[in-house]
Amino acid sequence: MYSRAYPQGIANSCWIVNPSVLPKLYALAIGNSPVFIPGADIANAPHGTLMGLPIIISQFGAAAGTWGDIILADLSQYLIGVKSSGIRADVSIHVAFVTDESAFRFVLRTDGKPWWTTSYTPLAGPTMSPFVSLTTAAA
């Protein structure tokens, strides 16, 4: 995965993992050197580092052993758009009129997607991307 990441984005990258993957990370090593270092520094990497990059734990990732359980992502290459009208705030005194309560509602419309529409093909070697996902594990 590291070799398929866009080289200029490695410094900005992080690992996004499902919580079910964490037990498997403790066994990872290259020779005698561990590649997973559990978190000890709340400010920089509260969930640890993998190959020197911080880990973000997300419940929205796929389960361990399936496609998308570990993602190497350069989140600076992800665009987020906000509707030009901004936050809309509404108030109603009618919703809970009987109990003399007011109801408040705030609406913010956003959307996001990767800045890149396709992967990058260098002159030599495999394709590269700012978002790389681990494939399904073989049984």
Image: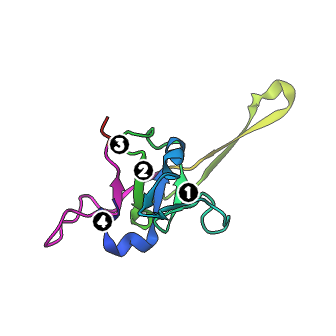
Q: CA distance from mark 1 to mark 3?
A: 36 Å
Q: Badge 1 is on which residue?
A: 86
**Amino acid type of the residue tagged 4 in the rendering:** Ser
Q: Secondary structure at mark 4?
A: helix
Question: Residue sitting at 39 percent across and 39 percent down?
Answer: 65
**Amino acid type of the residue tagged 1 in the rendering:** Gly
The residue sitting at the top extreme is 98
Q: CA distance from mark 3 to mark 2?
A: 8 Å
Question: Residue sitting at 61 percent across and 68 percent down?
Answer: 44
**Amino acid type of the residue tagged 3 in the rendering:** Trp
Q: Badge 2 is on which residue?
A: 70
Earlier in the chain: of badge 1 and badge 2, it is 2
Image check: 83 left or right of 6? right
Earlier in the chain: of badge 2 and badge 4, it is 4
Q: CA distance from mark 1 to mark 2?
A: 34 Å
Q: CA distance from mark 2 to mark 4?
A: 15 Å
Q: Badge 3 is on which residue?
A: 67
Question: Residue sitting at 56 percent across and 50 percent down?
Answer: 108
Residues in magenta, as a range: 111-135
Q: Which mark is residue 3?
A: 4
Characterize the magenta stretch by its predominant secondary structure. loop
Tell me the quarter of the picture where residue 96 sits.
Answer: top right
Depth check, mark 3 against mark 4: the one in front is 4
Image check: 101 left or right of 124? right
